[in-house]
Amino acid sequence: MNAMPAGSRPNSGVRQWLKRQIPGYFFLMPGFLFIFVFMIYPLFYSLHLSFCSYNFAFDTKPVFNGFQNYAKMLTDNYFTAAFANTMFFSALFFSAVMILSLLVAIILDKRVPWSGFFRTSIFLPVVIPLSLTGIVFQWILHQNYGLLNFFLSDLLGLGFLTKNWLGDEHWAMLSLVGVSLWKYMGMLVVLFLAGLQSIPRELYEAATVDGASEFQKAWRITLPNLRESFVICGIWAIIQSIKVFEQPFIMTQGGPGTSTLVLYQYTWENAFKFYEMGYASAIAYVMGAIILILSLLNMKLSRAE
Amino acid sequence: MKAPFSLARGIIFLLLLTLSFLFLVPFLWTLFTSLKTNQEIYSSQIIILPTVVTLEHYVKVLTQMKEFVNFFWNTVSITFWSVAGTVLLSAMMGYAFGKLDFFGKKIYLMFIMIILTLPYAIYLIPIYIMENRAGLVDSHLGLILPYIAINLPMSIFVMRGIFINIPNEIAESAWIDGCNFYQVWSKVMLPLSRPGLAVVLIFAFINVWGEFMFARTLTSSPAAQTLAVGITFLRDEAASWQYGTLCAVITLTLIPLLIVFLSMQNYFIEKGLMEGALKG
């Protein structure tokens, strides 16, 4: 809708055109101001900082230093570790969360009793603040007082499976993946369910008439029709996994050693512990670039065929 | 499905039941612990259900822990203003993008799209530097303003979707009846967009109530800290910290969230999620 009623003389000069802009900008501007000041300007300021050396504690002004921050990453062992850990976490979390949520969604899509209850309980963690999740799980996974080890050894009699879940460098990252699955799976289950429910039932009926097996139906009808869901869920899972922060920050502080140090935490520490704003911005930009590349790749793969 | 599959269906049902149980255990464990006596919490054998239900931890949190009460009111105030700002501004911007025509609309929309996918770290560093210069660090306003900004992009897309689906004729007849462009929005469009407003409100509430990273970075004293951050400090502080009190604090923090979520869950799981799926 335009501010002018339809049918009035179109294009009667610049003044008319300007007048038509008023309502749009009136409704746009107040909010856009927020987005500009707190997101768009920071986006460019951060890009600028990433080419500067700027220690917020000592320097009064950022000093341009070209690609030095980016070059520094290549020789920085902490960065390399954080990068590798983030990729490991992402690959594992991404595949696990996509496969498991799709499976659960397919099961819930068939009429099972209590499906509302199942959906709610799986979705519930999504609304729980990550810092609380972190504290509760830190305790549940504790070697001596933790519920998980108690459950394994005292209730199931599988004492050999008990671990120092967060303190053992082989298990710490896997534990974080587990906690993240608990936290985020519900979101993807709900999104996949929405996708499944939009597939016309007639397709399945026609296939049944033609004598297709359950597997053929899943392969030929369900998966191809879920393409849009794969794009949305995939991008969402990529974003969530690259920006993993609170889980290690609260539960392991990056340890033991550097086994759970992720890019986000390393950015945060550089910026707010060492006040190296330039280097931190550069790492943040690398993260942004990874997300962008993986999202595009995901879109390409999901739309291919 | 018919009888022959009932065994398979039974197994699937049991699997789902186990899965739900796994998702609910941390909640139940926290709740049960908050109701146990210290003696039971620290007994050498782990006790799952409290044998004697006690409210002593809650009483202690509410009467003796001044900091918790402080964190709670900070969270309420910051959440209230951030949500109010997000709802108002996204209702305006969503309307502009959904129903109005203006110069540069596509470019603005594209920018907002890109912003949705980038990690917060990119914004957080400049925001910290800016707020530090403006003296906003460690104030309520210093959190409310960026919270409104980070909740806007997704909210705009939800509202835009709602406004696009409202037929143009409704606005046109209001226009002919003599409403000005502001009245068309406030008197005709807003009442029709209530489902979208509800989705925006719930999402903003949940995002802000438990937000950690901005709150952790942009506040430094209990005067401005929220529960999500305060709780980690409460935990770290001194050895006097106890699991019973910790669980009571967590339960109290979760109650407002659970009330909002459970009372509006259908709304929230089924509608508006597709649009909301891409929050960064």
Image (cartoon, coloured by chain):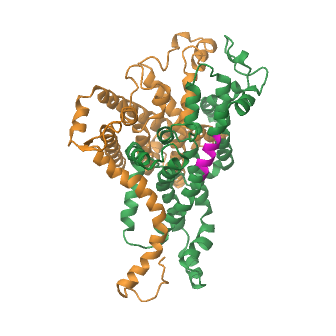
Q: Position of residue B225 (x, y in %)?
A: 56, 39
Residue in the picture at 61% in, 43% down: B74
In the visual, does A205 lie left or right of A269?
Answer: right
Q: Quadrant of residue B175?
A: bottom right
Q: Judge whether residue B73 is colored magenta.
A: yes
Chain identifier, orange in the render: A
Q: Quadrant of residue B252?
A: top right
Q: Position of residue B153 (x, y in %)?
A: 46, 55
Can residue B10 be seen here? Answer: no
Residues B180 and B23: in front is B180
Task: State which quarter of the image contains the N terminus of chain B.
Answer: top right
In the visual, does A234 lie left or right of B75?
Answer: left
Magenta span: helix, strand or loop, mainly?
Answer: helix
Q: Position of residue A291 (x, y in %)?
A: 35, 43
Q: Eyeballing the image, is A278 above or below B243?
A: below
Chain identifier, green in the render: B
Q: Eyeballing the image, is A77 above or below A32?
A: above
Can residue A260 be seen here? Answer: yes
Q: Position of residue A218 (x, y in %)?
A: 47, 43
In the visual, does A87 lie left or right of A191?
Answer: left
In the visual, does B149 lie left or right of A126?
Answer: left
Q: Eyeballing the image, is B193 above or below A210?
A: below
**Range drawn in magenta:** B72-80
How many marks overall?
A: 0
Residues A1 and A151: in front is A1
Q: Judge whether residue A90 is colored magenta.
A: no
